[in-house]
Amino acid sequence: MVVRVCERARLATLVSRVIIATDDDRILAVARKHGVEAVLTGPDHATGTDRLAEVAAALDCDIVVNVQGDEPLISPETIDAAIRPLLVDAEVRMATTCEPLTATDDILNPNIVKVIRDDRGDALYFSRAPIPYDRANPLVPGTTVESGRWWKHTGLYVYRRSFLLRFAALSPAPLESVEALEQLRALHHGFPIRVVETGHASPGVDTPEDVERVLKLLTEEAVSAN
C-alpha cells in the first residue's frame, strides 16, 4: 500500500522528490525493492509529523509534504492543491485539504476525521465526532445529507520546513491526546492551518473493512483502464 501512495505522490506536478520515512525494516525493504527512496527513522516518534521532522531536518528544501501511508487512492491533484497555498501566500505555514461528506455513516464514523473552517479557509477544529452537530436535524445512519455541510479531512499535510521543525518541538496538546489527532497541536498553540476544498475522494485505510473496500476500488479502476 505504501508503494501505491508513493506512486500517487510522484504524479503530483509540484512534488520533486518522494521519500518513505519509516521505523520498520520490512517497509524499508519493500521500498528499496520497488526503487523508492526510504529513510529509517528512530522508533520512538509519537506521531507521523515527528517522524517526518526527523527526515526533514536533513533535507535542503523549503516545503515538505506529508502524505500518510494509508491513503492509496489519494489524487495527485489533491496533493498539488494542498501545496499551492504555500506557494502563493508567504503567511501560510501549514496546509491540508478536505472533501465533502454526504453519507451519514461516514460522518458518524470516528475513523473518518472531520474538519470545520472559518471564512478564510483556515481550520477551526478537527474531530472524529460529527462536527458540526445539527441540533435541529440529528444525523440518521444509512441516509445521505446535503453536500457542503460536513467535510472529511484528507490524510496529508504540507509544511514550510522551518515551521515543521518548530511544530515537532512543541509540547503535545491535551485535545491532541484526546482525539488522537496531531494537527490539533498546531491549533492549540495558535498556528493556523489552511484547508483547501477538493472534489477528489480519498478513502483512507483505517480498518480491515477499509482494505477490502479499497482493493475493490483499485480492481474497478484497473478494469476501467483496460
Image: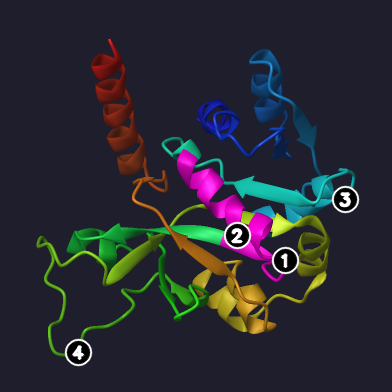
Neighbours of disc 4 within 10 Å: few (<14), some (14-19), many (20+): few
Residue 85 is labelled as 2
Visible in this render: residue 156?
A: no
Provide residue 152's location: percent of width, then percent of height: 37, 61
**Three-letter code, disc 4:** Arg
Residue 209 position, x and y percent, is 30, 42
Q: Could you give the CA–CA distance between mark 3 and mark 4, rounded to whole angstroms? A: 46 Å
Magenta stretch prevailing secondary structure: helix
The relative height of residue 54 versus residue 226 in the rendered view (above or below) is below
Q: Secondary structure at mark 2?
A: helix
Toward which corner of the image does residue 187 lie, by quadrant? bottom right
Residue 103 in view (yes/no): yes
| Dot 3 or dot 1, earlier in sequence | 3
Q: List the residue tagged with mark 1.
A: 90
Q: Is residue 215 left or right of residue 140?
A: right
Q: Which residue is mark 3?
A: 57
Give left or right: position of 62 versus 177: right
Viewer-side label of 4, 1: 1
Q: Work out which residue is located at the far front of the displayed protein and give it.
A: 88
**In terms of secondary structure, where does tag 1 sit?**
loop
Q: In the image, residue 199 lies at what x, y percent? A: 34, 50
Image quadrant occupied by the C terminus: top left
- Please provide the residue range marked out in magenta: 77-95
Magenta span contains residue 79: yes
Amino acid at pointer 2: Pro
Residue 211 or residue 83, whichever sits in front: 83
Front-most of residues 29 and 123: 123
For the residues labelled 4 and 2, the Cα–Cα distance comes to 34 Å
Mark closer to the chain start, 3 or 4: 3
In which quarter of the view is residue 192 placed? bottom right
